[in-house]
Every structure is written in C-alpha cells, then in structure tokens.
Amino acid sequence: MRAFAYGFALQVRLDLRSRTMLVACYLVPLLFFAVVGGIFKAVMPGVEATLLPNMTVFGVTMGALVGLPPTLCELYSPPVKNLCRVNGAPMAFSLLTCALSAFLHLLVLSALLFVAAPLAFGAARPAQPLSYALGLALFVFATTALASALGLAVKQQAQASLWSVVLFLPSILLSGIFFPAQLLPAPLRALGLLFPATWGNRLLLGETAALWPLVGFAFLCTAGCAALLRAKKREK
C-alpha cells in the first residue's frame, strides 16, 4: 500500500510536469472556458443556467480523452512494461496510478470551473450541490475509464493521439453542450448516446434518468480495462 501511495503521488507530480496532461487538463479547458464562455454569454440569452455543466463536460472530456491515452500507451509499451515486470510491479499498477491521477486533476479542474463560472459569467450554481458533486464524480470516473481502455487498447502513441481526437470530437459535438441535441438528425442523436459526455451533460443538468446509463458506461469501460490488462499480462 505504501508503494502504491508513493507511486500515485509521483504520478500526480509527473502529470503536472507533462506537457500533454498540463495542456489537456488545464490550459486548453480553461482557455476554452474564458473565450467560449464569454461568447456564449454575449450571444445566447439564458445560457447562465447551463454554462457551468457545459464547460465542465468539455473540460473533463478533453482532459481524459486527449491527455490520458498517450501516457498509458507509453507506460505499457514493451520496454517499460518489461521493466515493471522485472521489478515485480503488478500489471495494473501503472493503470491505477495514472487513472487516479487523471481523476484527481479533472476534479481539480471541475472545482476551478465551479468557482470561476459564477464569478466570470454569472453562471447558475447547481440547486443541489451534493447531487451535482456525486454526478460529477461518476462522470469523471466513466470518462477516465473510457480513456484508460483506449490507452490500453492502442499500442503506439501516435495512434493513441489520433484515436483520442476521433473519440473527443463526436463526444463534444453530439453531447448537447454547444446546441440542443434535439436539433440534430435522429442518426446523430442516436450516435451521441454512445458517449459518456452526452449522459454526463444531462446528469449535471439535473436529469436523474441519465444516472444508470452513465453507471453502465463506467462498468463496461472498467471491465474492458480488466480484460485488456489480462491480455497484456499474457504478452511477452
């Protein structure tokens, strides 16, 4: 347990020094919030009611899907994986430390947005802060699990970056944070239901019916990570 705590603390510090994680988890989401939040405020009357959940969904999805997979892909490359195996580290060690570190950083980002959105743009705070916080934690977990599964499934960092963007763009464009999903054609609305961002946005906006689909996403992605870890353990 002490070794895991040390590894987790080390990974948190490494992520702060990682250009990919720093840009994906903090710089781009906060810059997007500052610029696009001002635009939404100016051109969309009543956006204050949805601004905080929308910006949070963008930031969490960006940080997880763009920042985490390349890091995991590098840590589970054959040289690093074999080094960990020789030193007796469990196969899940790198995944758990990276995923928990990303989870923590995304919660910190969400807290920054929670404080800044009402001050900067008059965004409405959630009527039930505790329910919002629990829903946010579930959404961050589900999105982190999806990003972890992607990082384990892809074997080259270039491919990981490519597939991160392939998942990130439809997650954001079809989630309803830029415009109501009802404006989309039926096939695109159905496609949007395949991404945690859609259900996370609905849950943070107070739609309790989005809870169980998001739980299902978290369970399936976690099971996928376990299966991928078993496959990597059998690799030489």
Image: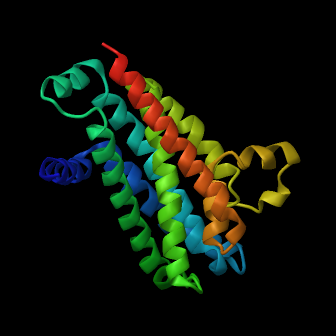
Q: Residue at x 58, y 35 (%)?
A: 166
User: Which quadrant of the view contains residue 29?
Assistant: bottom left
- Percent coordinates x, y for residue 3 in the rendering: 13, 47
Instruction: Tally the marks.
Output: 0
Residue 43: x and y, percent?
70, 72
Q: Position of residue 33 (x, y in %)?
A: 50, 65
Give me the residue at 48% from left, 80% from top. Answer: 120
Residue 122: x and y, percent? 55, 85
The residue that appears at 41% across and 37% down in the rendered structure is: 69
The colour scheme is: rainbow
User: Compared with residue 180, is residue 130 higher up or lower down, i.e. above or below?
Assistant: below
Q: Is residue 231 above or below residue 26?
A: above
Please state which of residues 229 and 35 is positioned toward the viewer in this rendering. Answer: 229
Taking depth in this image into account, of 209 and 54 the one nearest to the observer is 209
Q: Would residue 172 be found to the left or right of residue 146 on screen?
A: right
Residue 138 horizontal side relative to residue 50, left or right: left
Question: In front here: 64 or 22?
Answer: 64
- Quarter of the image with the C terminus is top left
Would residue 36 be seen by someone viewing this image from the given angle?
no
In the displayed structure image, the side of residue 110 where residue 37 appears, left or right:
right
Q: Answer yes or no: is residue 118 visible.
A: yes
As drawn, the residue found furthest toward the right would be 186
Q: Residue at x 46, y 84 (%)?
A: 119
Give the vertical position of 169 relative to 26 (above or below): above
